[in-house]
Image: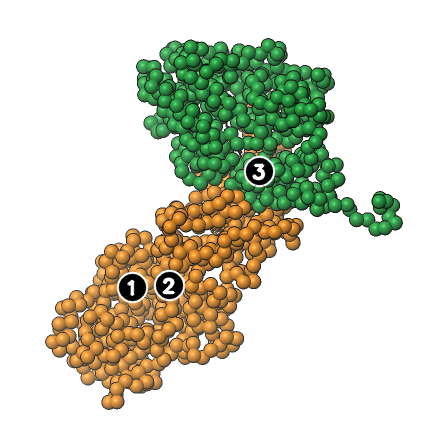
Amino acid sequence: MATVTIDNKQYEFEGRPLLLQFCTDRGIEIPHFCYHPSMSVPANCRQCLVKAGTPAVDRATRQPKLDEEGNPVIQYFPKLMTSCSMEITDGMVVHTHRSSELVERAQKDNLEFLLVNHPLDCPICDQAGHCPLQIQAYKYGPEGSRFEFEKVHKPKHIKLGPRVMLDGERCINCTRCTRFTAEVSGSHQLTIIERGVNNFPMTPPGVEFDEPYSMNVIDICPVGALTSIDFRFKARIWEMSSAPSITATNAKGSNCFYWVKNNEVLKITARQNTEVNDYWLPDEDREGYQRFNDDRPHGPSGKTDGGMRPMSWEESYAAAVDVLETADPARVLFVGSPHATVEDNYLLSKLAGHLGADTPVYLEHTVPGSGDNWLITDDKTPNASGCERLGFNAADVPLLRSKIQAGGYDVIYVLEDDPVSSGLFDSNVDAKVILHYYNTTNATLAAASVAFPAAMIVETVGTYVNVDGHAQRVRPAKAVKGVNRTLQMEMGKSRLDQHGTPFDKWYDETKLVDCKPGWEIIPEVAKGLGLELSYRGPKQIMEEVSTALPSFTGATYESMGLVGVRLSDTPTLV
Amino acid sequence: MEVAKQGTSKAGNWRDYERVLLPKVKNLHKLEVYEENGGYQALKAVLTEEKWTPKAVTDEVKASGLRGRGGAGFNAGLKWSFMPPVDDKPRYLCCNGDESEPGTFKDRQLLEYNPHLVIEGILIACYAMSITTCYLYIRGEFADWITHIEHELEKAYAKGYVGKNIMGTGFSTDVVIHKGAGAYICGEETSLMNSLEGKRAYPRIKPPFPAQKGCWNYPTTINNVETLACAPLIINKGAEWYSAIGAPTHPGPVLYGISGHVNRPGVYEFPTGMLITDLINEVAGGMRGGKKLKAVIPGGSSTPPLRADMIDGVTMDADSLRTAGSMMGTGGMLVLDETVDMVTWLKRVSHFYHHESCGQCTPCREGTGWLEDIVGRIDRGEGNVRDLDLLADLCTQMEGRTVCALADAAAWPVRYTIERFRDEFVAKCKPTLTPAGSPLTVDA
Ligand SMILES: Cc1cc2nc3c(=O)[nH]c(=O)nc-3n(C[C@H](O)[C@H](O)[C@H](O)COP(=O)(O)O)c2cc1C
Ligand code: SF4
Ligand code: SF4
Ligand code: FES
């Protein structure tokens, strides 16, 4: 097999990989800025220089030249090469800064240049702490600067569009942002203007940078030149924890990080998953994080003679048991949820089965025509596919509504949804409603007999199946009130302090939402009805689902890991 | 006249030289006049005569030893031979008339006085490489010359020399004139292609080379105006005739654009390999006002300046100039007399490259401005002697580390002007402070 020698160590390779990508894949770090694996390679930052050579060939014999010891003679390229743009060929010899002083020097030199006109306003820059320029300047840059002149001034705090702010002076002209709009999103809304040291990205005259994917340039900008208008100055990166999870805005389940400070989600950024969303997130996935923080309920409530009143969790379970215990199973409607995890829906269906009620249905939330065949789908929920695979059917809302209106049901059990807003029934419905809900703005609350505050995607552990049949796990990004060992274990121990625990310097009791995940609530209700759903947590539930249901074969927590698994297209079976 | 000490002229009997690129013919720019003087006969020959297969034309140009006149001096026929075999995909020729290097003004002369020679050269090159479209990219500021050559091109179209079925031979080629986008960098060949495509004129990385992926990603050859103008001469008079003119390793007639402190600045056609001293003292009529020569910049502002004492016996061809410590470049020769402050001169040159860097690569974008800052500070009398070391460092940090050669073009004048005129720079720096009483202290 073809080989390449990097810093005196041999590696095998196939095809014609680019050197920088090849090294990155093997953990051999080479500093760089402009290269991005899913865009064209302009080799303009000049940071990734290496020394490289190929075996010399004798012109006459066309055979490789050998030295006295029979080793191939290496003919080095006269100039240092940009590793991002150089294809590896057989027998190539490469020296990075680890084995060449010249390369080490060249990388220092380049960083010196990068910093001469950079404002160095790290103390007030959002990017500080996770800035490729800052990090690489520390690691590979020179000490101090020899530049003694006034820096170039360029436009600052320019709103490129509704969501993205530009600081021209921080820009290092890597063209990642302009290439993103030209090659990835195709909007062509950004271009570099001016010339030379005055260059910076800008929209064409009369154009706003308002494409539905605009905020990705904030993620890929290697400096703090592009920042989020919404997030600017809200928190330093080191004050936040980040949880790798997925978004719940639509059925794509794009991979993301939830950034949390003092138990509030402050921003959502893209996380790489080549099977799902590459490196990108639509803006709509990043916005709307406020619903995780605002209008959250404080503990369960239930209807008594005097109307709705707060209850303890035990009281609320008993109230739900009360309602279900006496009901005729044929007159109990279970409404599953495309917002809820597979695990929660599965437990709901077990409860329905135990009582002898029909399989749950679920409510669709689609906006036809709003999808774009990329990362935005018509379906605005993350788990309709999971519901289908559990054998749930989408509710025929008009039909079911008339049945409810005709008094066809005595009890309606709703998992994490808002059927009143969906028009399934009205708030004065003549049936008892048990509701798991997220926000106090939920219109069905007015109809509820028992209301359980439910943990949202950022507070639970569970599985979602996206529109393409990709099963993925979610992880808690923020803590809930009360002790739940499973949630705490999943949260990532190293940064526990930043979730707002009592040890945290920003600890604020009021920011902890008193809610519970479905997989904690449903077993409590089931127990009162004589059904033991004693799982050690959602992981074990999913083990059962993946063995019991062919449509979930292989979807264990181990195999889903951080990037999920593609489920087979077996027809739903129940 | 000064006598050559180290070398002798390679230009032979140049005083009797008869001009071929810009012959002494009145109104030659007019198609009728060009035709009367044997115009378009070379084209007719290659299109009609059996022996002129495309490969034979390329081989003839290769054999002539013609080297590119755009700056890099690459063998033109060899470049043509890099074009891949013909298939059904488009391929392009770009004729580079962006002419923007300070001190260079010879392509404009050709476009004004002998435009049909350029057009004929383009057509021959297109035939040799089986190309059906040529873009003639002319510096935007040459507005008048663009109108002028457009007019002549129309006439050539009307007469059937350009366009469909040229001279009834079945060979077709279009020539499209493109007005440059107003930046020096547009003359860099890959930047020129981006500019043509309507993109920002950022040079492209190589590989892939233009012959593999050029305009719109199709095989493309780029040649300078003067380079292509040589093609009809080579066809008419043969490779042997051409290669016998001037310096053997860098042959042919060449347009010397002489400017600066000489009595008769201008564009002069002579063989390559002329002694610099002959060019200054005879061709350009000697130094203006009888002043002493201080420096010669042989081929445009990016080529390293030669001190007056470095030019004896040096001839205008790649080999001799390399030995002397400079380059042929575009043949645009700047002559500076003793009144010139080399620091101020360098400040002006540095300003140019700072102003013209496209800003794509870090070392060039940041380095060109920094060079100008420091040279400017020295020029104002506020520099320190240590700045000279810093300048040399910055040049090292720029040279050979960028996408295109503009960074080198910016660094070389700095490096070599300081190296060769160091005293002038030191004299302009702030005095180095030494403690009173030190043996180094100079009494005021
Ligand atoms: C910064 C820069 C500017 C250039 N400008 C010109 C120009 O104005 N005209 C030109 O013919 N070549 C120019 N060149 C050289 C071209 O890149 C290219 O080498 C030339 O056009 C090839 O033609 P030739 O082989 O016939 O010389 C420039 C090169 C650089 C690096
Ligand atoms: S704004 Fe950021 S991403 Fe865009 S060119 Fe500048 S540094 Fe690169
Ligand atoms: S060297 Fe300078 S002019 Fe050339 S591509 Fe790089 S920045 Fe642009
Ligand atoms: S990563 Fe920017 S030049 Fe290679």
The Cα atoms of the two marked residues, 1 and 2, are separated by: 15 Å
Q: Which chain does green denote in the image?
A: B
Screen quadrant of the C terminus of chain B: top right
Q: Is mark 1 within 8 Å of ligand 2?
A: no
Q: Nearer the viewer, residue B367 or A20?
A: B367
Q: Seen from this angle, which residue lies furthest left? A: A406
* Horizontal arrangement in the rendering, residue B109 relative to residue A297 (left or right): right
The Cα atoms of the two marked residues, 3 and 1, are separated by: 58 Å
Give the residue number, with chain letter if any, for mark 1. A381
The Cα atoms of the two marked residues, 2 and 3, are separated by: 47 Å
Q: Same chain for labels 2 and 3? Say yes or no.
A: no
Q: Is residue A411 above or below residue A191?
A: below
Q: Same chain for labels 3 and 1? Say yes or no.
A: no
In the picture, the disc for residue A118 is none
Q: Is residue A259 above or below residue B229?
A: below
Amino acid type of the residue that numbered disc 3 sits on in the rendered structure? Phe
* Horizontal arrangement in the rendering, residue B234 relative to residue A145 (left or right): left
Camera sees residue A272: no
Q: What residue is drawn where x is 72% and y is 18%? A: B2
Q: Which chain does orange denote in the image?
A: A
Kindly check if marks 2 and 3 are in contact, taking CB atoms under 8 A apart as contact. Answer: no
Give the residue number, with chain letter if any, for mark 3. B352
Say what secondary structure mark 1 lies in: loop
Give the mark nearest the N terminus, 1 or 2: 2
Image x and y of residue A348, in percent: 26, 73
Which quadrant of the view contains residue B262?
Answer: top right
Give the residue number, with chain letter if any, for mark 2. A287
Say what secondary structure mark 3 lies in: helix
Q: Seen from this angle, which residue lies furthest bottom? A: A305
Kindly check if marks 3 and 1 are in contact, taking CB atoms under 8 A apart as contact. Answer: no
